[in-house]
Amino acid sequence: MAQTISIEQVYEELKKIEERMITKKELESLIETIEILNNPDTTRQVVESEEDIKKGKVKLIKSAEDLLDEL
């Protein structure tokens, strides 16, 4: 004998599945993070930048002109 299932039961199961899913944007962000962490040069630059920030080696850039002045 075939088991019957209600629309409500299907809906509840779909909600459970949806809760475990991630969005395309979240997946793209995760992939980007993995790519960055797998690149030794980029990882080194991030670490160096964090150290510079801790040491106060930062400048406030308020405009494109400020940025160009730094080049």
Image: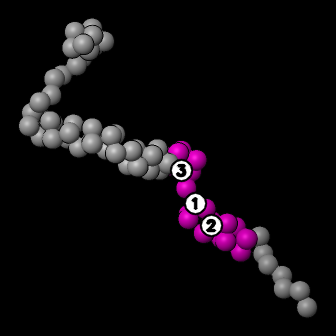
User: Please, what secondary structure does the residue beneath circle 2 have?
Assistant: helix
Cα separation, mark 2 vs mark 1, equals: 7 Å
Q: Is residue 27 magenta?
A: yes
x, y (%) of residue 24? 58, 47
The kind of residue on which mark 2 rests is Ile
x, y (%) of residue 64? 30, 12
Q: Which residue is depicted at the point 23% across and 43% down? A: 47
Magenta-drawn stretch, dominant element (helix, strand or loop): helix
User: Please, what secondary structure does the residue beneath circle 1 have?
Assistant: loop
Q: Judge whether residue 66 can be spotted in this image.
A: no
User: Please, what secondary structure does the residue beneath circle 3 have?
Assistant: helix
Q: Is residue 37 above or below residue 46?
A: below
Q: Quadrant of residue 15?
A: bottom right
For the record, the magenta segment spans 9-29
x, y (%) of residue 2? 89, 86
The residue carrying mark 2 is: 17
x, y (%) of residue 61? 22, 19
- Mark 2–mark 1 CB contact (< 8 Å): yes
The residue carrying mark 1 is: 21
The kind of residue on which mark 1 rests is Met
Callout in the foreground (3, 1):
3
The residue carrying mark 3 is: 27
Dot 2 alpha-carbon crowd within 10 angstroms: few under 14, some 14 to 19, many 20 or more: few
Q: Is residue 25 above or below residue 16?
A: above
Q: Is residue 31 above or below residue 1?
A: above
